[in-house]
Image (spheres, coloured by chain):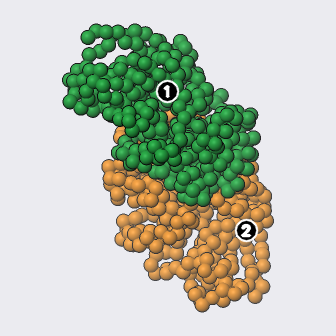
Chain colours: A orange, B green
Amino acid sequence: MTEQMYRVALASRPTGAPGPENFSYEAAEMPPPGDDEVLVRVHYMSLDPYMRGRMDDGASYAAPVPVGGTMEGGAVGQVIASNSPHFKPGDFAFGMFGWATHAVQPANMMRKLDPAQAPITTALGVLGMPGFTGWYGLTALGKPKAGETLVVAAATGPVGSMVGQVAKQAGLRVVGIAGGPDKCKLAVEKFGFDACLDHRAYDTAKALRQDLSTACPDGIDIYFENVGGKVLEAVMPLMNNFGRIPICGMISWYNAGGLGAGASGEGLTAPAIWRTILVKFLSVNGFIISNHFDQYPAFLNQVAPKLASGDIAYLEDIAEGLENAPAAFMSMLTGGNTGKQIVKVI
Amino acid sequence: MTEQMYRVALASRPTGAPGPENFSYEAAEMPPPGDDEVLVRVHYMSLDPYMRGRMDDGASYAAPVPVGGTMEGGAVGQVIASNSPHFKPGDFAFGMFGWATHAVQPANMMRKLDPAQAPITTALGVLGMPGFTGWYGLTALGKPKAGETLVVAAATGPVGSMVGQVAKQAGLRVVGIAGGPDKCKLAVEKFGFDACLDHRAYDTAKALRQDLSTACPDGIDIYFENVGGKVLEAVMPLMNNFGRIPICGMISWYNAGGLGAGASGEGLTAPAIWRTILVKFLSVNGFIISNHFDQYPAFLNQVAPKLASGDIAYLEDIAEGLENAPAAFMSMLTGGNTGKQIVKVI
């Protein structure tokens, strides 16, 4: 079984925003599954902001992708060969199959999917790591209370839209921030946000802050952080005493090279951040969802029925073809997508 | 009863480090106690870093001292006239009497002291707000576990020495940072720190970090933050995953005017702080002890017996005379004191 497959490799490490030259779309030999391993034909793969971090060499919570290695990422596909009793050909599964048409993975690193229960793409977004990230970060770290006010950016993305909907259903005032009037409309009409501001309409954090303070007349109790930069700078002075800031990402700073110089939000200094945490008695918590998989069944139990009943909405943006994954990824990093960015591989 | 008293007023707001011109030592008319109020002759007053913040006009967790107003602060003294059934002349009490020889306070804002139980000065330090701050911040927010490593600066101060001793008794490796070799020796010999570094011996955060990493071979699990600046910059990259940072102050940044420019620790950027919180899954919590007075009895119950038995040590630095309070305060802000800074007023 030495058939051909295709993959996208990391051709070189980017400095600043990644470009096409950092990726290489290439043929490769299809690996045979070893003991307890499974060979999968990938149908859909996920594109997520965290992948930008894996392209760098710096210390992070995960090892970087080696230059020449296949770009990492979650995907869903169908088993075509299995050396595990837990999977048989034809089964659908989620796994870290990477940016590739095919992948071999140990069976215990994969999760079987029931396509009759929910479309398999949802395992990449609303019912996958992004949705779980939003749900866990909000409930465990944001500790929402009815009557409070929450702000989240990337409001129509798979994390932000989950955060907003769960918070709204918990009785909070929910204010989103998104890029462009169309996304803002979606946030309010599709996801039920009370208000949504278009960050592109503001040149400065100060201007954004002014409208944000109007949209949040009682201040901000929870800022669910996934963007950093200008939004963070706008939000910090509006935080209420005893506010909570769960941090799952900071996409606006991912491309900033040395992280700071030239990035938006440059009006923020370290002492100003530290001082706000002190004088407002904030609780700021960084997290990555992979440390909390023990909560995944609880998440599915709560959210999957709401998805089926329509009480939780979701939005997907599906690019066609593995060879177009780099372009879709680069576009996503600057907000070019609307909803969870997925690539249809087959 | 229109006798004369003395007080130190805020003459003007400082820009940067306060100078003698910002204070005014002056005579005032002694106020008579009203209903349920008590007139106290102050014996000892406390000098604390937070008072620097009260001299500024910016938003903080407490209103600024008005220009012309008496400098605020905790003190201990003896009742000389009382309109409350709860106090009689001769009683000793703690209260927010300010920088003054005498003060009138509502009885319900004062706490009676038993001078037979502990010296009344301890109500300003080891058994007062600073000691309570260290104990609460460490136990409630630092969540110490045996075998972990803790770092705290101002190690011989009333907060740092409490943090270090409680952490050591909980089975942690405890590393202090202090200004000068004498304080470092005290931290180890009097307070039982495993090691103590003299921050004055390091020109850069990087150099401090290098020796700190040697002193903390397993990384840092808890950084009890009371200084900010160069120490914070040195500490951040050494934090372990799931580390905790309780923040009760940032004395090195208090005099920085706009808070940031020119302060030590200027190598720290906001994105770098935010990124470390994210990728190390840190929990950063600001607090002020006055929000947690419900825990004060628990603190006293635990710590007062240890003080009596000698299991908790403490150190006081007593300046003589109210008129010398401004000089002692300015000196304290740059580490000129050794141990809890107190002013003997009577």
Amino acid bearing label 2: Thr
Mark 2 crowdedness (10 Å alpha carbons): few <14, some 14-19, many ≥20: many
Q: Quadrant of residue B157?
A: top right
State the mark number for residue B342. 1
Question: Could you tell me if residue A25 is visible in this image?
Answer: no
Q: Is residue B142 above or below residue B185?
A: below
Return the x and y of residue B297 as percentages of the image width and height.
36, 45
Amino acid bearing label 1: Ile
Q: Is residue B142 above or below residue B124?
A: below
- Does mark 2 fall on the same chain as mark 1? no
Q: Nearer the viewer, residue A249 or B254?
A: B254
Q: Nearer the viewer, residue B248 or B120?
A: B120
SS at badge 1: strand
> As drawn, is B231 to the left or to the right of B101?
right
Chain name for mark 2: A
Residue drawn at 51 percent across, 34 percent down: A206
Return the x and y of residue B7 as percentages of the image width and height.
41, 15
Q: What quarter of the picture does the N terminus of chain A occupy? A: bottom right
As measured in the structure, the alpha-carbon distance from the residue carrying label 1 to the one carrying label 2 is 64 Å
Chain name for mark 1: B
Residue on which disc 2 sits = A70
State the mark number for residue B218. none
Nearer to us: label 1 or label 2: 1
Return the x and y of residue B184 as percentages of the image width and height.
66, 38
SS at badge 2: loop
Q: Quadrant of residue A304?
A: bottom left
Question: Could you tell me if residue A117 is visible in this image?
Answer: yes
